[in-house]
Amino acid sequence: MGLKRLLKMILAYSLFIIMIGCSTNAGEEAEFPPSMNAVAEVNGTDYQMEKGNEQWVRKKG
């Protein structure tokens, strides 16, 4: 009798968690792509990072 009650409680709790987790709208409000501000410090001088068309290239040597 106690085992059935425990299983029912676990099932009810699991369904409650699933319903709460699936009903949030947190992902829809997020900005995509995210806007980020960045600063690079070189030799004590701050340089503002800006969006550009740069890419990393591996050089031999």
Image: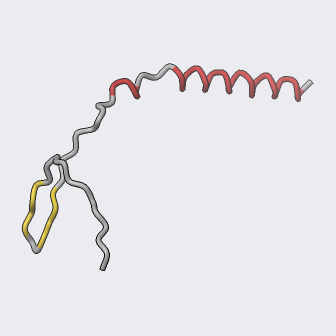
Determine the residue positioned at 29% across, 31% down: 31
Q: Can you give x and y, in whole percent of width and height, for residue 17 in the image? A: 61, 26
Total marks shown come to: 0
Determine the residue positioned at 19% across, 48% down: 53
61 or 36, which lies in front?
Answer: 61
59 or 36, which lies in front?
Answer: 59
Task: Look at the picture and state if 31 lies above or below 57.
Answer: above
Task: Look at the picture and state if 22 lies above or below 45.
Answer: above
Which image quarter holds the C terminus? bottom left
> Would you say 18 lies left or right of 48 here?
right
Query: Which residue is most to the left?
Result: 45
Task: Look at the picture and state if 27 lies above or below 59.
Answer: above
Which image quarter holds the N terminus? top right
Query: Which residue is most to the right?
Result: 1
Determine the residue positioned at 14% across, 66% down: 41
> Would you say 45 lies left or right of 54 here?
left
Determine the residue positioned at 37% across, 24% down: 28
Q: Can you give x and y, in whole percent of width and height, for residue 27 in the image? A: 40, 28
Q: Quadrant of residue 12?
A: top right
Q: Can you give x and y, in whole percent of width and height, for residue 19 in the image? A: 58, 20
47 or 59, which lies in front?
Answer: 59
> Would you say 13 lies left or right of 51 here?
right
Q: Can you give x and y, in whole percent of width and height, for residue 37 in the image? A: 18, 47
> Would you say 36 lies left or right of 30 here?
left
Q: Quadrant of residue 6?
A: top right
